[in-house]
Image (spheres, helix red, strand yellow):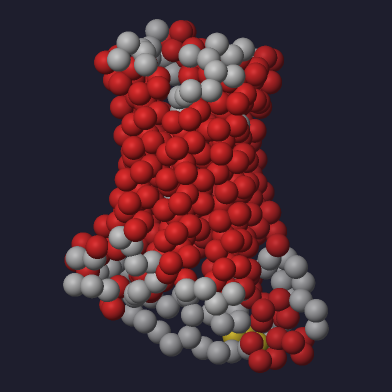
Amino acid sequence: MHIDREPKEEKRTTASPLGRSLSPANAGSLGKPTQARQWMIVFAVTLAVITYVHRVCISQAAPTIQRELELSKEQMAFIFSAFTFAYAAFEIPGGWLSDWIGPRRVLTSVVMLWSLFTAVTGWAWNLASLVVFRFLFGTAQAACFPTLTKSFTLWLPPSERVQAQGFMWLAARWGGALTPLMVVAVFALVSWRWGFVLFGSIGVVWAVFFFRWFRDNPRDYAAVDAAELALIQSGRTDLVGHGDVPWLRFLGSRTVWMLWLQYFCLGYPWYFYITWLPTYLQEQRHVPVAEAAFLAGFPLFFGGLGCLFGGFVARRLEASGTRVGPVRRIMASTGFFAAAVLLVLSTYLKNPWLAMIAMGASSFANDLAMPPAWAACMDVGGKYAGSLSGSMNMMGNFGGMVGPLVLPFLLNATNNNWSLTFWVSGAVYAIGGVAWLLIDPVTPLDQDEA
């Protein structure tokens, strides 16, 4: 993939919406800036919640769908994996599309499309229709987070982007955590079919408001004053284009291969939480539906805290003068190994609440690896950080596709021995921890080993 733009030297002054010349140097002389850019974070956070509501609701509805449409666990696994495969395969093209025609049209279009496919999921009549609807849903949703990240580069100064990403991912995790309770409440009022229609309509409403508010260039938004525009444009070096992505250089780097491997190992166990967990709680743990919906939110809730905690600790250690490479390597590998132990431990705790607390702690440890992984993509990839992070996230979602697909086959081969599935996931986590020991998370590709 390549972007057909020649690198251009960015101008240091830009015409404001008021006709003034702006630059970082005179930003402070323009008075207190407006806060219109904060709405970009609000839209991103709310969309992150909607994204995970649409993604997770089918896992809570899975037992009912299986009974009504007479589907086996293996068939339900194909339905789960249809989304993940499409999501992984179309993530890089989705991000490139936002670079080409702008986030406003891309994000509005894909949110409308995946909301439509969420709604029509409620009218599925057999296995094939569900697989097609979830595949198309994943195709549209793949562009979401790359395009939101692109929007952050357009609307936020560099100093505010990491914090915005933190809020967005926290909202995504917690949106998924609250979804089981929301689904149970909705399904108590309407059938699962009309429930999907209701969830889909929420995305349509968001898309309408976003299209009316958002502009690809904040200069075109009247509520942005000259001081805020100067602040947004300060230190802008992120819009410079580049030529062909050096995929051969990626393939020749041990660090890149290990980044891909560790994210695959992160996605394989984690997708259990948003696919098979409600079924596990009801069938294996014999937890009532309402209680299972509450417990199913533990891993995503604690995972969100893990993202924030991991980033906070890493920043504090790095600010204290500790070497960045070892901090990231130790943080991520410790998270992987701890996640493996805690996940296996959860299967031996007879009390469902204690088991889910252990599983939530495993998810917390899992997400300690998130900040180091994405930071490594930025430092190792340099000007190709977008391509490297996109390829890494693609591998993580391929892991998420394989995990739900393998589980029913393991159950059939072991007479419904759920414990074995957790041992396998624990082993995958351990492989991810070993992979991190072989990663140089700070050296750019052009200085990497041959």
Which residue is rendered at x = 76% and y = 76% of the image? 33
x and y percent of residue 55 in the render?
51, 34
Viewport quadrant of the N terminus: bottom left
Say if 160 sits above or below 140 in the image.
below
In this rendering, does residue 50 appear at all?
no
x and y percent of residue 415 in the render?
32, 11
Q: Quadrant of residue 82?
A: top left
* Residue placed most toward the observer, 116 or 262: 262
In this rendering, does residue 11 appear at all?
yes
x and y percent of residue 303 in the render?
56, 43
Answer with left or right where residue 413 lies relative to residue 284.
left
Which residue is rendered at x = 36% and y = 56% of the image? 436
Which residue is rendered at x = 51% and y = 45% of the image? 365
x and y percent of residue 57 in the render?
55, 28
Say if 359 sits above or below 98 in the image.
above
Q: Quadrant of residue 17?
A: bottom right
Answer with left or right where residue 330 lies relative to residue 407.
right
Which residue is rendered at x = 64% and y = 87% of the image? 24
* Residue placed most toward the observer, 393 or 435: 435
Answer with left or right where residue 82 lies relative to residue 295.
left
Viewport quadrant of the C terminus: bottom left
